[in-house]
Amino acid sequence: AQTVTQSQPEMSVQEAETVTLSCTYDTSESDYYLFWYKQPPSRQMILVIRQEAYKQQNATENRFSVNFQKAAKSFSLKISDSQLGDAAMYFCAYPPGNQFYFGTGTSLTVIP
Amino acid sequence: DAGVIQSPRHEVTEMGQEVTLRCKPISGHNSLFWYRQTMMRGLELLIYFNNNVPIDDSGMPEDRFSAKMPNASFSTLKIQPSEPRDSAVYFCASSFDVREQYFGPGTRLTVT
């Protein structure tokens, strides 16, 4: 069963604009973590942002923020004021118990 | 902190040869993960250690793959004998109690 789903294989955004990447997940737990990772062409996996499910406030890290909808099991990433350096693959991740599930990724292109 | 260290960064070998990939996790982390990434299959979890003990190796493709973690600061992933279909980028990641994972730079393996 697919635990983490990213339904957008590719997205594009104009430089300085805002883009939202979608992620949904399956869980029966009430307390858990969710993460977004970025993988630029250098292929280094970089942690972008984390959300703790028991916190109602959406996490924010500079230009990156999440829209966490616990009931809908949705965890989208919003990138504001997009920059050329934001071009990368973005992976949503969910660690239930001893596992760590990644989505299939969304390739983001930033258009100058 | 130096982050997760992997060696070698690139490995080119001939089919049938033994390949050993190495990983040094972040000091203080108690969980270590080995992943394989290919275009066809995306990011796959191969094996996961907690406190140096293998917890889940269900992702290890076959008996040709083996992983060890003799102590908290070192792990190896061995492929013997290697095959062209093993060509991929292999990542090591570490975390504290299966929270956010921090990835190494990866080892790009090419088997000819």
Image (cartoon, coloured by chain):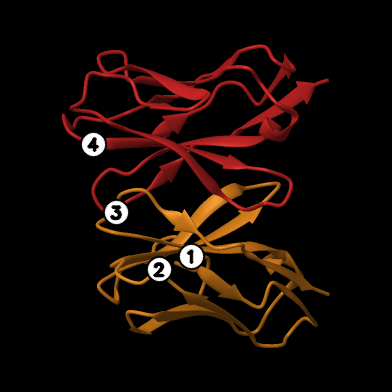
Chain colours: A red, B orange
Tell me which residue sits at (45%, 22%) in the image. Answer: A65
Q: Nearer the viewer, mark 4 or mark 2?
A: 2
Question: Element under label 4?
Answer: loop
Count the marks: how many? 4
Q: CA distance from mark 4 to mark 2?
A: 23 Å
Q: Which residue is mark 2?
A: B26
Which chain letter matches label 1?
A: B
In the figure, B110 relative to A79: above or below? below
The image quadrant that residue A90 belongs to is top right
- Three-letter amino acid code of the residue under disc 1: Gly
* Disc 3 to disc 4: CB gap under 8 Å: no
Residue A5 placement (x, y as % from top left): 47, 28
Q: Earlier in the sequence, mark 2 or mark 1?
A: 1
Tell me which residue sits at (57%, 50%) in the image. Answer: A45
On whether disc 4 and disc 2 are found on a single subunit, the reply is: no
- Three-letter amino acid code of the residue under disc 2: Ile
Q: Which residue is mark 4?
A: A32
Q: CA distance from mark 2 to mark 1?
A: 5 Å
Q: Is residue B64 visible?
A: no
Q: Which residue is mark 1?
A: B3
On whether disc 2 and disc 1 are found on a single subunit, the reply is: yes
* Disc 3 to disc 1: CB gap under 8 Å: no
Q: CA distance from mark 3 to mark 1?
A: 16 Å
* Disc 1 to disc 4: CB gap under 8 Å: no
Question: Element under label 2?
Answer: loop
Which chain letter matches label 4?
A: A
